Amino acid sequence: MTLFVSGSIEAQDTVRYTTAGVDSFLVPAGVTKVLARTIGAGGRGGNATTTNKGAGGGGGGAFAQDTVIVSPGVNYPLFVGNGSSSDNPGDSSWFNSVSSVLARGGQSVIPDNTNGGGSGGSAVSSVGSFKRPGGNGATGIDASYGGGGGSSASKDGDGQQGNNQ
């Protein structure tokens, strides 16, 4: 997660949060707004439990951003999503609240031995003034290889589909 911090003057600082989990941002004196950019975490790739099975790749996380009006001296909560290691999707990442700025995580591949890739994090169900979808995981090819995971989206573009080569 990246926060672009600015006050009433044109000076700007950048704060990045990269460790998964709950954290907070203490607004410095003179700061009145932040541009919050969030990226959802990736979904888990498929689990091949039988011989000659090529499982699909997990979906990449969505991107969301918005400007949030803040008050100096106040702590604002945030959450950096963790990539999935289960059947659940990757965690969503958010700033201030899940209804303020939120980027959805990518879908995991379920059940075991599924060839199809997980869907990328949804831009439609993310929250913010500017959103992009995560890339879909690639399809696995039986007796050959598993599918690659989809990439996360960014401010510069949608997440890209994984490939299986």
Image: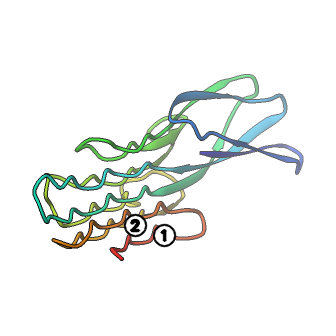
Q: Where is residue 158 in the image (x, y as percent from the top left)?
A: 48, 69
Tag 2 near tag 1, CB within 8 Å: yes
Q: At 13% across and 66% down in the image, what residue appears?
A: 52
Looking at the picture, tell me which residue is in the foreground, 90 or 145: 145
Give the residue displayed 26% in from the left and 43% down from the top: 88
Q: How many marks?
A: 2
Element type where label 1 sits in the image? loop
**Front residue (pair 39, 112):** 112
Decide which of 144, 120 is in the foreground and name it. Answer: 144
Q: For this view, does 4 lie left or right of residue 11?
A: left
Tell me the kind of residue under disc 2.
Gly
Which element carries disc 2, helix, strand or loop? loop
Can you say whether 26 is above or below 147 in the image?
A: above
Label 1 sits on residue: 158
Taking the image as shown, residue 68 lies to the left or right of residue 111, namely right
Question: Spatial distance from mark 2 to mark 1, Cα to Cα?
Answer: 7 Å
Say which residue label 2 marks. Answer: 135
